[in-house]
């Protein structure tokens, strides 16, 4: 027997009241998701205690699409360690006037054109 991902088992246990139903009436899924979102859970590897409706909905449709395999933890994409061409370009500072200096320069130019 193949081992089942522990996170998939946890997610399936959370979704139990929904996935055990043969048929859901119109609007019943949303109502059940809201009830499940109000509960507290001992989430493995986390200090969090609640799961959002949207997360529960994502899990439910993953279960419908792929079964228990869809509830398994997915590996995260690794970020490359070596810098790419864009991150190695040196930034050049853009000289800017402060607001005070800008107004002083504008006033000086205005006085010069009036004289």
Image (cartoon, rainbow, N blue to C red):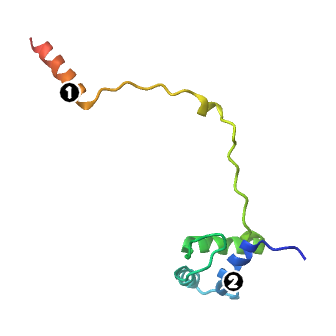
Pick the quarter of the image with the N terminus: bottom right
Tag 1's secondary structure? helix
* Earlier sequence position, callout 2 versus callout 1: 2
Q: Which residue ends up furthest to the left in the rendered image?
A: 115
Depth check, front residue: 39 or 55: 39
In the rendered structure, the answer to whether residue 105 lies left or right of residue 36 reads left
Task: Please name the residue that numbered disc 2 is placed on.
Answer: 19
Is there CB contact under 8 Å for labels 2 and 1?
A: no
Tag 2's secondary structure? helix
Residue 24: x, y in percent?
Answer: 63, 86
Q: Which mark is residue 23?
A: none
Q: Kindly indicate the quadrant of the structure image that contains residue 39.
A: bottom right
Task: Please name the residue that numbered disc 1 is placed on.
Answer: 103
The answer to whether residue 66 is above or below residue 86 is below
Q: Residue at x 65, y 84 (%)?
A: 18
Q: Which residue ends up furthest to the top in the rendered image?
A: 115
């Amino acid at each position: 027997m193949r081992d089942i991902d522990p996170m998939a088992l946890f997610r399936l246990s959370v979704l139990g009241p929904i996935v055990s139903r043969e048929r859901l009436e119109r609007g019943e899924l949303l109502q059940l998701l809201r009830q499940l979102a109000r509960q507290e859970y001992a989430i493995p590897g986390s200090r969090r205690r609640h799961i959002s409706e949207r997360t529960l909905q994502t899990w439910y449709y993953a279960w419908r699409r792929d079964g228990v395999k869809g509830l398994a933890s997915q590996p995260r994409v690794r970020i490359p360690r070596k810098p790419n061409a864009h991150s190695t370009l040196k930034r050049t500072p853009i000289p800017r006037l402060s607001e005070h200096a800008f107004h002083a320069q504008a006033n000086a130019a205005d006085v010069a054109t009036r004289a």
